[in-house]
């Protein structure tokens, strides 16, 4: 196809996409999420909030547009980069919600497509696209946090399968998920990074017991998961046995970029919220120290947004500045923490109310408390700074 | 618009790095400081810059310039920061040329630009009257006479005052702001060099009944305050690019020192207390690169108000350069405090560039005001 034909093709694709979305995206799915509960996570146990939510997922999944860039042979949309971007733009244009929030799409799916066997792709990718199976991540352990490669969850070789024993922690939505992708110690005789495997198993397998952990925000997005004599078929190992650390790092990079994106917040700006919330007699932003802190934050957020853009542009044009995910994770999460501290202060005493409709059941203090985890999960701020110092600056 | 340099912009960056690293080093700055000549810059290097077309980079080709963009010009600003080169470049090629492009009539442009682009006429903006940047605060007067104007006033922190051929003076004509091009040799003009911490060419300019002919009034646009505000935004974005260059250079030198300097039997870069601070500084500089590039592109795009982004950029780079230079000295330890070692020149230049046309707090305040809070 000539470049000209391709461009015409893209224009046509945009028109068709716009028309299809207009016809198929229910009106109630063209509104921003009011809370985290509005997200559709799919899976065996998911209770749809409305028929519209269910319909929207099914219609998008049928076209593979829940995972637009994945290959069609596994149920994906088969779109190229340009088309994927157009779909995203057209969805944003009408404020369409993402039809499916999924660790399958964001994390394990790309890893299976990149490292997994053909059988694993056939088995796992289509249900991820359709939102039928919800995944959770078994990475951290009580004694393996920042030192993740020191994990001890043991996988004993039984010929055609492993028997897994140990404990995982910070399993996101472990109590709601259907399958887990899990790092296990398959060899303890070698250097710690060389004896790790990435295995997949059903959460209904005997011996798997997730237990929710209540956070300081009052909610329980994480579990600790106990694994007792859990049988895992060798066919469910992603990539080679004992080579799981490579895939783990690949996934961590993904996760960091995702969490780093938290530095960007949409909707009403922080300063405008603060102006709206200032009910003192002196008038808008009478607290000049808060005003200065907010201005400094907004400037940083602006520079960070340009940095995300520049990194994306440089990756495209291969003027890559190298390992930037650690920096984006570090800076983005610290920015988000600062934003919520400022927002809390802008709300004054209202910002401390945990219950009651007028206070959205404590939405502000809950997100403030939740944000404290941003610089811990996916590798702490200190781990990111270690990575930058060691791998980018060549120190130590 | 993508946030990467085009091939031509990259080439200009490399050319600037090449010319400045061949013809200039921090020891040249040291020598200028110690010998204190009247024109404290390298004239051959300035001529060479002019020959390379740098003075007229953003001047349209029909006016004798290169017709290139501010992203390109910004590459030179950044390299000037990295090399600490002292020259009339900022006052003439960035502030002066852009003011003339924006506020001079066609015939004034044709009269003045060729000599400026050739490096034969240097310019200096005489604006500040108070120790804190306050561009509205202009008490200098331009009183209309039959044959032109009579100027009176006193200007301070005028960059390149001791070596400029022409001053662009901001004054008030019956309360209304105006811009006049004043020959440095006119009777009634006295220039007093102020020896600044960065060893640059700043000075006080006193105007005592200075007669200026009417054809030296720059009034292509009616709204002089708006025109001046845009020029100050452009100047601040280029100062930010210079501060970025300073920060990058200080980071590079400091990183090398952390790798070389041994204490307790190991390079001090092995200590996590220093590693994390260096990694934080590196991250800040990456943000600085992004916002400077976005701001330079915004000058070229010439859409809407430049001031919000200019203020954000200057505020951010003031903060980054302050962090970089302070950390630079601290991480170098005792040797960083010695005059013999070069790192001190960077902190001195940084503070001057930060202060010129408003520092961090000034611009954060402007940013907040522009965003209605």
Image (cartoon, grey):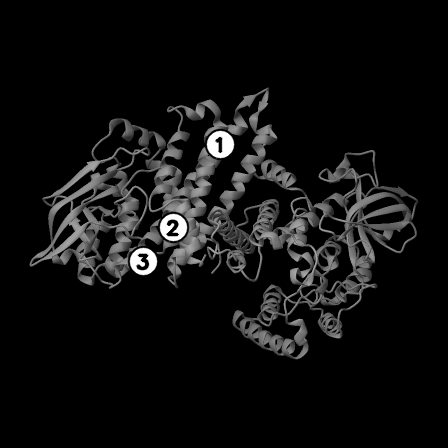
Q: Is residue B363 left or right of residue B221?
A: right
Between A388 and B209, the one nearer to me in the picture? B209
Task: Provide residue A58's location: percent of width, then percent of height.
Answer: 75, 72
Residue beneath disc 1? B254
Spatial separation of the CA atoms under disc 1 and disc 2: 25 Å
Badges 1 and 3, same chain: yes
Read off the chain for label 1. B
Element marked by disc 2:
helix
Q: Is residue B240 above or below residue A47?
A: above
Tell me the quadrant of the picture where the C terminus of chain A can be found. top right
Task: Provide residue B269's location: percent of width, then percent of height.
Answer: 57, 29
- Residue at (62, 79) in percent of width and height: A19
Residue beneath disc 3? B67
Read off the chain for label 3. B
Q: Could you tell me if residue A125 is visible in this image?
A: yes
Q: Disc 3 or 2, which lies upstream in sequence?
A: 3
Q: Residue furthest top?
A: B264
């Amino acid at each position: 196809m000539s470049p000209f034909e391709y461009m015409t093709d893209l224009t046509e694709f945009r028109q068709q996409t716009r028309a299809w979305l207009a016809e198929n995206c229910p009106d109630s799915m063209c509104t921003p999420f009011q809370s985290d509960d509005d997200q559709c996570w799919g899976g065996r146990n998911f209770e749809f909030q409305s028929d519209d939510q269910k319909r929207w997922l099914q219609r998008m999944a049928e076209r593979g547009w829940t995972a637009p860039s994945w290959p069609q042979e596994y149920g994906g949309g088969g779109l190229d980069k340009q088309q994927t971007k157009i779909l995203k733009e057209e969805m944003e244009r009408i404020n369409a919600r993402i039809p499916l929030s999924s660790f399958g799409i964001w994390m394990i799916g790309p890893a299976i497509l990149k490292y997994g066997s053909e059988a694993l792709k056939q088995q796992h990718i289509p249900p991820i696209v359709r939102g039928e199976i919800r995944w959770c991540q078994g990475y951290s352990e009580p004694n393996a946090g920042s030192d993740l490669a020191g994990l001890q969850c043991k996988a004993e070789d039984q010929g055609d399968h492993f028997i897994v024993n140990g404990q995982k922690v910070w399993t996101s939505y472990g109590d709601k998920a259907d399958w887990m992708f899990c790092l296990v110690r398959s060899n303890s005789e070698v250097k710690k990074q060389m004896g790790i495997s990435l295995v997949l198993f059903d959460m209904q397998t005997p011996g798997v017991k997730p237990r929710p952990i209540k956070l300081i925000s009052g909610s329980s997005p994480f579990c600790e998961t106990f694994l007792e004599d859990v049988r895992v078929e060798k066919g469910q190992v992603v990539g080679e046995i004992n080579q799981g650390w490579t895939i783990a790092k690949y996934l961590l990079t993904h996760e960091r970029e995702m969490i780093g994106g938290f530095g960007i917040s949409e909707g009403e700006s922080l300063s405008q919220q603060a102006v709206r919330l200032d009910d003192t007699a002196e008038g808008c932003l009478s607290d000049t120290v808060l005003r200065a802190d907010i201005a400094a934050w907004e400037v940083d957020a602006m520079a960070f947004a340009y940095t995300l853009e520049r990194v994306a542009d440089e990756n495209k044009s291969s003027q890559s500045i190298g390992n930037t995910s650690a920096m984006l994770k570090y800076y983005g999460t610290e920015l988000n923490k600062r934003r919520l501290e400022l927002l809390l202060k802008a709300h004054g005493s209202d910002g401390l109310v945990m219950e009651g409709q007028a206070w959205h059941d404590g939405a502000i203090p809950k997100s403030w408390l939740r944000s404290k985890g941003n610089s811990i999960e996916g590798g702490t701020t200190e781990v990111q700074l270690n990575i930058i110092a060691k791998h980018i600056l060549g120190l130590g | 618009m993508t946030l990467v340099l085009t091939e031509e912009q990259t080439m200009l960056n490399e050319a600037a790095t090449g010319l400045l690293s061949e013809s200039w080093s921090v020891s040249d700055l040291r020598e200028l400081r110690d010998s204190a000549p009247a024109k404290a810059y390298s004239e051959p290097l300035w001529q060479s810059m002019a020959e390379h077309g740098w003075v007229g980079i953003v001047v349209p080709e029909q006016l004798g310039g290169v017709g290139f963009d501010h992203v390109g010009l910004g590459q030179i600003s950044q390299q000037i920061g990295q090399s600490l080169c002292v020259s009339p470049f900022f006052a003439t090629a960035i502030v002066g040329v852009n003011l003339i492009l924006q506020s001079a009539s066609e015939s004034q442009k044709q009269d003045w630009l060729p000599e400026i682009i050739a490096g034969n006429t240097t310019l200096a903006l005489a604006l500040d009257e108070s120790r804190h940047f306050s561009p509205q605060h202009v008490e200098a007067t331009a009183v209309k006479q039959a044959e032109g104007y009579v100027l009176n006033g006193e200007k301070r922190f005028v960059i390149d005052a001791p070596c400029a051929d022409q001053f662009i003076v901001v004054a008030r004509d019956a309360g209304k702001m105006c811009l006049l091009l004043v020959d440095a040799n006119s009777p009634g003009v006295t220039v007093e060099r102020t020896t600044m911490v960065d060893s640059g060419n700043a000075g006080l300019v006193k105007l005592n009944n200075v007669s200026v002919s009417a054809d030296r009034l720059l009034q292509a646009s009616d709204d002089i305050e708006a025109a001046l505000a845009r020029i100050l935004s452009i100047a601040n974005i280029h100062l930010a690019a210079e501060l970025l260059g300073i920060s990058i250079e200080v980071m590079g030198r400091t990183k090398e020192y952390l790798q070389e300097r041994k204490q307790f039997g190991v390079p001090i870069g092995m200590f996590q207390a220093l590693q994390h601070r260096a990694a934080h500084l590196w991250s800040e500089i990456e943000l600085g690169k992004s916002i400077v590039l976005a701001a330079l592109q915004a000058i070229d795009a010439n859409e809407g108000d430049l001031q919000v982004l200019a203020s954000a950029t200057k505020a951010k780079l003031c903060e980054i350069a302050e962090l970089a230079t302070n950390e630079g000295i601290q991480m170098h330890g005792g040797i960083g405090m010695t005059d013999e070692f070069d790192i001190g020149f960077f902190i001195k230049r940084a503070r001057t560039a930060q202060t010129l046309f408003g520092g961090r707090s000034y611009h954060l305040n402007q940013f907040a005001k522009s965003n209605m809070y």
